[in-house]
Image (spheres, rainbow, N blue to C red):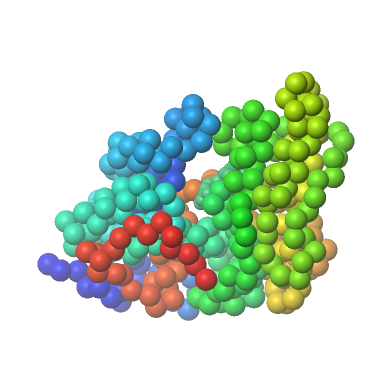
Amino acid sequence: MKRPAKPTKKENITILAIETSCDETAGAVLVGRILNKKPEFKFLSSVVNSQIAIHKKTGGVVPEVAARAHMTNIMPVINETLKKAKITLADLDYIAVTSGPGLVVSLIVGTEFAKGLSLSTNTPLLPTNHMEGHLYSAFAKRASEIKFPVLSMIVSGGHTMLVLMQSYKKYKVIGSTVDDAAGEAFDKIARLLQLPYPGGPEISKLAKKGKQDVNFPRPMMNMPNFDFSFSGLKTAVLYYIEKLTKNGKLKLTAQNKADIAMSFQNAVVDVLLTKAIKASKKYKCKTITLSGGVAANQPLREALRQACADHKMKFVVPDHELCTDNAQMIALAAYFHLFNGGRPKTTSKVKADPAWEIH
Ligand code: KG4
Ligand code: ZN
């Protein structure tokens, strides 16, 4: 029997979400109501298989290695996701898959796997944007209590974005990075300090031991727009290291490294905080949300939490497991797509699209 392409009048719909855009193979099951006035959903399971141990050896993600690992992991991850949710493929109403943006070879694994599953089980397919996943991840808890307009700050390994949300459906990207993303900057500085991959958590761990702030530049912080730039900051750190080490003739001390990590982190947090508050004032936002891998950064979370309290705004940040890549956020973006009246796409027409940007 062919399943309907439109949402049915069924009370609850069940979505299996699949995420393979970078170096995490992940699955999640969400059940929710899409015909309600207010969003209502819960997660039945979430499984994340991280490839960090593999990519540590090369100090970063090698796309072909990531894709090969996704191929090995995807079946077991999806089986475990369904098992943990105590459901079978026959219970699914929709399959959601990250089809962009991301590493093309990684995206292809998840997308083609999802297409095969969709065709063989006659289940409608929802190609889902990874950045929409990060955007909606902030709605994972008490979504119906979030007050609009919302200023959403998304800071990940590939993106830095400010998104103005007027409703669950209507959003607009009002600022993004002109060069490196915030997470990418953390990873690059970590490499300069010979810290392991991924650099973000290592930098913030080391920053706790910092004593003296070097006062690195805050690029674009006082420009009237909401765009970001982090490559100049990276260069400033590089020059500072070259000066301290006399162009590599000397070694950085442990304290030098901690001071650099702290000063770099302070500069990034300062820029992100200043721009977020400026944008939220301009657009009279009632809530600021913070998501993406860099949202796991404690000083950034605390700085935004404090600033929101000072400016009488609500602050929402997902739990750590929802900040870094996972499939729950993909299930959520797919859920809100349906909740907002969106429809699945013809399975055969779905393609991995590494350059799929939101606007
Ligand atoms: O969202 P995500 O898991 O993957 C992408 O979509 O890019 O973000 C990964 C990024 C990496 O650059 C990683 O270094 C950074 O998030 N990250 C952090 C922290 N934890 C992860 N950056 C700063 N502080 C952290 N605690
Ligand atoms: Zn991500």
Name the residue at 77% across, 49% down.
267
Q: Is residue 229 left or right of residue 70?
A: right
As drawn, which residue projects farthest toward the right?
A: 212
Give the camera-side residue of 301 and 245.
245
Q: Can the viewer see residue 296 in this picture?
A: no
Name the residue at 85% across, 40% down.
213
Name the residue at 35% across, 67% down.
12
As drawn, which residue projects farthest toward the top?
A: 250
In the rendered image of this protein, does residue 161 appear above or below residue 36? above
Q: Is residue 204 left or right of residue 347?
A: right
In the rendered image of this protein, does residue 300 appear above or below residue 8? above
Count the numbered circles shown: 0
Q: Which quadrant would residue 96 be assigned to in this image? A: bottom left
Q: Position of residue 92 (x, y in %)?
A: 27, 59
Name the quadrant of the N terminus: bottom left
Q: Position of residue 165 (x, y in %)?
A: 59, 73
Q: Position of residue 223 (x, y in %)?
A: 77, 66
As drawn, which residue projects farthest toward the left?
A: 1
Q: Position of residue 65 (x, y in %)?
A: 38, 35
Q: Can the viewer see residue 72 in this picture?
A: yes
Q: Is residue 121 left or right of residue 213?
A: left
Name the residue at 68% across, 56% down.
229
